[in-house]
Image (cartoon, helix red, strand yellow):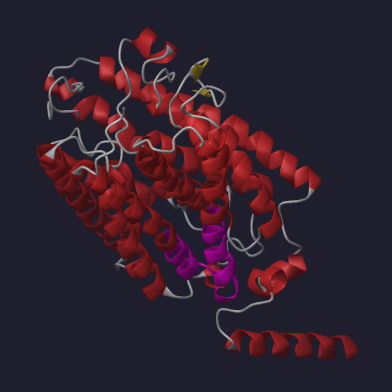
Amino acid sequence: MEDTALTPDLVWMLVAACLVLLMTPGVAFFYGGMTRAKSALNMIMMSFISMGIVGVVWVLWGYALGGGGASVAGLFGNPFEPPYSFGMQNLIGSVDLVGAAYGGTFAIITVALISGAIADRTRFGAWVVFVPVWVTLVYAPLAFMVWGSGGLMLDGAIANALGGSAIDFAGGTVVHINAGVAALVLALIIGRRYGFRAEPLHRPHNIPLVMLGAALLWFGWFGFNGGLAADAAQAGLIWINTLAAPAAAMLAWLVVEKLRDGKVTSIGAASGLVAGLVAITPACANLEPWAAMLLGVIAGAAACLAIGLKYRLGYDDSLDVVGVHLVAGLIGTVYLGFMAAPTFADAPLGLFYGGGAAQLVIQVVAALVSMVFTGVLTFIIGSAIAKTIGFRVSAEDEDRGVDLSLHDELAYEFIEEKIDERISEAKAAERI
């Protein structure tokens, strides 16, 4: 009979799951403060509804597909073979429910991250359809491929062909590259906001809210990275690296801002912090602290430069999900191929630690497979929604603000007065 004693490691995993769940409201505040005032509630709701939908999907079938169990061609778990069955019905009385709880919080925040790229112009109903379909067809299979027993990149076909498994301790591929690619695809499908290049039109409306969201994210990230720590030594290393990398990334972002723009910003500090957290996610258990700080410097500077690509290439990633999550996620994943250190027994070694180029090749392949898999499936899902129920609000609703148009609510009551004034001015202009 299974031992169900509440051991310290299980208690910590439950606490870590609570910390990760708190990160999604952190994302909501972080994104909500960066939108226009008349879109803030909609942005926050896109994160909160993700918690509701994914919470249900994960219990009913998401964990069965992504959590482990019998492999189906290395792509996803078999929901028809116990113990990973529909509705978790075969897990009652098992400590596996603790792992299921922890995994569910990862699924929630991953889909919530995508929403920032399509702020200000997305139909809420379309988002409600997208979330469960994407988690089912994209997130759960990729989680299984990277972390599941028999998954393609853990001990399945790709890992066997390359002679080793990709290192992704807490979600560089599964969470950040996944969300970043999906964000880019949806931004291209939905199209640019009206006045996309008119910077004053889309300036963040509440920067203290952004800073609060960033603080909640950093706090929760210690559970995000550390929930599966094997022992006290590894837990300590993960904690230090989760402190060091984002701290260095924040400073690097601000240095780039100062050199480029002549001043530093609060938004830059918060964004640099998040970029460092993203980069250290896959690498938190496999780097020496000094190498984690170097990773933070590289990721913070690169992400700061990358957010300007949307203006050069013409895609509208509203809140820089691509620049922060995709770019920093790629850097953190590939960096391991160079800098993975002997931090625990049998740890894979990077190129600079005498491991040769093998792990670098594995990391690059894992990143590329994740990008292609997510990009193709997200394009199919997003295009289907766009062509059927429609993904974008009307120009009139976008100008009015999606809070009022879609939810009949306002974050700030003074906005309604401004809207009434504009309507009166427009009617007066028509009479003239």
Vertical position of residue 38 compared to residue 11: above or below? below
At horizontal 58% and vertical 51% (from top left) the residue drawn is 53
User: Which residue is nearer to you in this view: 379 or 318?
Assistant: 379
Q: Main secondary structure of the magenta part?
A: helix
Position in image of residue 231 (x %, y %): 14, 37
User: Which residue is nearer to you in this view: 230 or 411?
Assistant: 230
Q: Verify whether residue 38 appears in magenta.
A: yes
Vertical position of residue 415 compared to residue 176: above or below? below
Vertical position of residue 152 compared to residue 84: above or below? above
Q: Is residue 380 left or right of residue 204?
A: right
Total numbered circles? 0
At horizontal 34% and vertical 58% (from top left) the residue drawn is 217
Q: Is residue 17 left or right of residue 311?
A: left
Q: Is residue 291 left or right of residue 309?
A: left
Position in image of residue 11 (x %, y %): 25, 48
Q: Magenta segment range? A: 27-50
- Residue farthest along the front direction in this orientation: 1
Image quadrant holding the N terminus, namely top left
User: Which residue is nearer to you in this view: 8 or 288?
Assistant: 8
At horizontal 60% and vertical 30% (from top left) the residue drawn is 376
Q: Kindly indicate the quadrant of the structure image that contains residue 230.
A: top left
Position in image of residue 315 (x %, y %): 58, 48
Q: Kindly indicate the quadrant of the structure image that contains residue 102.
A: top left
| Residue 324 seen | yes
User: Which residue is nearer to you in this view: 241 or 365?
Assistant: 241
Image quadrant holding the C terminus, namely bottom right
Vertical position of residue 425 compared to residue 125: above or below? below
Position in image of residue 199 (x %, y %): 53, 67
